[in-house]
Amino acid sequence: MHTLRLLADPERLGIDVGANYGIYTVVLGKSCKNCIAFEPNRSVAAAAERRARDAGLTNVEVRACALSDRDGEVTFRVPLVDGVESDAFATIEDDNSLSGRPVHSYTVPCRRMDSFDLDPVGVIKIDAEGHETAILEGARAVFGRDRPAVLIEVEERHKKGSVSFVENFFSDLGYEGFFLMGRHVVPLSQFDLNMHQNTSNMEGPEIRLDAVYVNNFIFVADDRRAEQFRMIARAGRSL
């Protein structure tokens, strides 16, 4: 959440992709000129909207819609843990096996970010359980126009090749990358897939508290903000 506050532009729109119950939506609503949150699960989207309203935010809009590289409808799968829907791990990504768990499936609307008439975008947070590459493909015009900062969760276990795709996507656009190791910022050049996304450091879908597992990445195009994160990384201080 502190990272999002550092990335936010108070004069621009913040976008929360995969808003879930709106914890980060509220951060963006407080830190940005306004915020649009996307959450495919209709009941969870309604809860995110209530959270923003209870926080006194009038600049937040929550849309019960998935984002991808196409417009239409898609299948949204919610895994079951002990018979209960685990909505935090739900996805529209076909390559995500959801650890073989049984699922409830729903048909939900799906849009490209580029299909919306958005105000200038300052920051985008993405957490889509493996569908990140398609979301980025569907937002190329937004990235070309506004060059927003990005906080994105990417895991190879959800979709093979996704980490290198995301790295190359932003490198081609002239962005500089970092990753979060715990509460520390580290330059992306130091990321090692075998070391930092070792699945033996997972217990089911959760990261072991005594182990290292990296899944949050930062990408910035603005030189001033890039230097800010370089300084944080060099100082080695905790966020």
Image: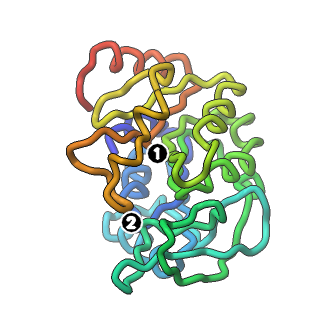
* Front position in the image: 207 or 125: 207
Q: Residue at x 75, y 56 (%)?
A: 69
Task: Give above or below for 161 relative to 229.
Answer: below
Numbered tag placed on residue 52 in the rendering: 2
Indicate which disc, 2 or 1, sits on the residue closer to the N terminus. Answer: 1
**Which residue corresponds to mark 1?**
32
Is 84 on the left-hand or right-hand side of 70?
A: left
Q: Residue furthest bottom?
A: 83
Q: Quadrant of residue 197?
A: top left
Q: Residue at x 57, y 55 (%)?
A: 130
* Front position in the image: 105 or 45: 105
Task: Give above or below for 2 relative to 115.
Answer: above
Question: Residue 220: where, in percent of width, then height?
Answer: 54, 28
Label 2 is placed on what type of residue? Answer: Ala
Number of labels in the image equals 2
Q: Residue at x 61, y 32 (%)?
A: 167
Asked if disc 2 and disc 1 are in contact, CB closer than 8 Å, the reply is no
Asked if one can make out residue 35 in the rendered structure from this viewpoint, the answer is: no
Query: The C terminus lies in which quarter of the figure?
Result: top left
Decide: few, some or many residues near mark 1? Use Cα within 10 Å; few <14, some 14-19, many ≥20.
many
* Front position in the image: 209 or 176: 209
Question: Residue 158: where, in percent of width, then height?
Answer: 54, 55
Question: Residue 224: where, in percent of width, then height?
Answer: 49, 17
Question: Residue 74: where, in percent of width, then height?
Answer: 71, 73
Query: The N terminus lies in which quarter of the figure?
Result: top left
